[in-house]
Image (tube, rainbow, N blue to C red):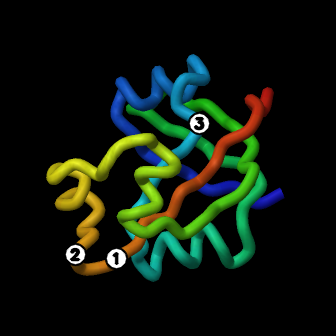
């Protein structure tokens, strides 16, 4: 099984562990395209600090345009989000859709 690691901040880590966040977004860069699509990994490993690690199955990964955020998130991409994802440069974002928890 192939896995990919995501380093994330505590509030987002807690949301993923609690199941309230089921999509993880990344910039549409060569690095993330290769990590998430060549081939698509089976497991997402979320790391927060040194000791917090959580694993979930990956259902699928998709390429989203700015307009797709309306459908997926139910709201427009904020100006801060546009800057974080460098949407003016890359035009797309990779969305990793998460499944059930993977026990170690």
Write down the residue under mark 2. 88
* Label 3 sits on residue: 22
Q: Secondary structure at mark 1?
A: loop
Report how far apart the C-alphas of labels 2 and 3 lie in the structure.
25 Å
Q: Is residue 58 left or right of residue 79?
A: right
The answer for how far apart the CA atoms under marks 1 and 3 are is 22 Å
Q: Nearer the viewer, residue 102 or 71?
A: 71
Q: Nearer the viewer, mark 1 or mark 3?
A: 1
Is residue 40 placed above or below 22 in the rendered structure? below
Residue 14 picture location, percent across and down: 46, 21
Residue at the spot x=29%, y=62% of the render? 85
Q: Position of residue 66 (x, y in %)?
A: 36, 64
Q: Position of residue 41 (x, y in %)?
A: 72, 61
In the picture, residue 50 is in which quadrant?
top left
Do labels 2 and 1 touch, CB within 8 Å?
yes
Calculate the distance from the C-alpha at mark 2 to the C-alpha at mark 1. Answer: 6 Å
- Residue 85 falls left or right of residue 35: left
Q: Residue shown at 54%/69% (left/top)?
A: 63
Question: Given contact means CB atoms under 8 Å apart, are the residues at marks 1 and 3 in contact?
Answer: no
CB within 8 Å, label 2 to label 3: no
Label ID, residue 91? 1
| Element marked by disc 2 | helix
Q: Position of residue 30 (x, y in %)?
A: 45, 82
The numbered mark at residue 38 is none
């Amino acid at each position: 099984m192939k896995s990919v690691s995501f380093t994330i901040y505590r509030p987002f880590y807690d949301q993923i562990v609690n199941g309230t966040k089921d999509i993880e977004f990344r910039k549409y860069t060569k690095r993330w395209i290769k990590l998430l699509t060549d081939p698509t990994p089976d497991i997402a490993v979320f790391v927060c600090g040194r000791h917090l690690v959580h694993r979930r199955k990956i259902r699928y990964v998709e390429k989203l345009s700015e307009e797709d955020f309306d459908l997926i998130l139910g709201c427009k991409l904020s100006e801060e989000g546009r800057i974080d994802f460098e949407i003016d440069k890359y035009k797309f974002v990779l969305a990793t859709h998460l499944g059930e928890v993977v026990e170690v």
